[in-house]
Image (cartoon, rainbow, N blue to C red):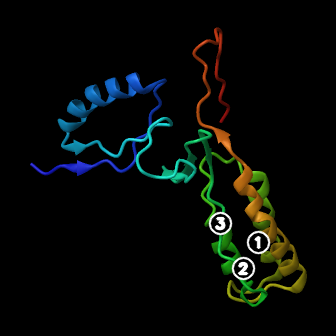
Amino acid sequence: MESFYIENFVTSVSNENALCRFNEESKPIIATACFDLRGWEHTSLKIGRDPSDPILVLGLLWEKDEDNIFCDTTVSKCSSLDLARRNVLSIVHKIFDPLGVLSPATLIPKLLIQRSWNLKTGGDTILPDDYQREFSSWLYDVDCLLNVKIPRSLNIDKIHGLSLHVFL
């Protein structure tokens, strides 16, 4: 029977002993479904790569040495000649933010696109100068969003009476 590789499986364990135990217990279970669990990462494991190099996990970047996750906001820079609505949309949607932590910053170009619909022009029509300046200003500053980092671990083991409330 053929085995399939699980590309991204994320869980958290408190220490290396728990990681070893999880590895030993989960591999046989997952193997029953013909999946091969491999490519382990842990904050304390050194696997021949620079620990300061972020690792891609479920579309987010994980900085192991600080144990933070963050969004890849490196987008292609374009000239002002390319600033049509379609190109602006393409650039903005290259920022993958599944947690929504960058929403206040990515809202700016989305509102610009929304306003551009009032111009009643096509998607390939170059945006007016004031729109181009506004988007170019946002694009110039977008690299600062790489500094928005979220601690991956909450370390709630010693906190009693903790509750999580989610509103949808």
- Can residue 154 be seen at all in this image of the molecule? yes
Q: Nearer the viewer, mark 3 or mark 1?
A: 3
Q: From the viewer's perspective, is 112 left or right of 159? A: right
Under mark 3, the amino acid is Thr
- What is the residue that sits farthest to the top in this orientation? 160
Number of residue marks = 3
Element type where label 2 sits in the image = helix
The alpha-carbon separation of the residues under discs 1 and 2 comes to 7 Å
- Marks 1 and 2 in Cβ contact (< 8 Å): yes
Q: Which mark is residue 85?
A: 2
Number of other residues with Cα within 10 Å of mark 2, as a class: few under 14, some 14 to 19, many 20 or more:
many
- Can residue 111 be seen at all in this image of the molecule? no
Ranked by sequence position, the earlier of labels 3 and 1 is 3
Q: From the viewer's perspective, is 98 left or right of 85? A: left
Q: x%, y% of residue 127?
A: 80, 84
Q: Is residue 140 above or below residue 104?
A: below
Q: x%, y% of residue 155?
A: 60, 23
Q: Is residue 8 above or below residue 26?
A: below
Q: Which mark is residue 74?
A: 3
Under mark 1, the amino acid is Ile
Residue 133's image quarter?
A: bottom right
Q: x%, y% of residue 2?
A: 13, 51
Under mark 2, the amino acid is Arg
Q: Which mark is residue 148?
A: none
Ranked by sequence position, the earlier of labels 3 and 2 is 3
Number of other residues with Cα within 10 Å of mark 3, as a class: few under 14, some 14 to 19, many 20 or more:
some
Element type where label 1 sits in the image = helix
Q: x%, y% of residue 76?
A: 65, 75
Q: Which mark is residue 113?
A: 1
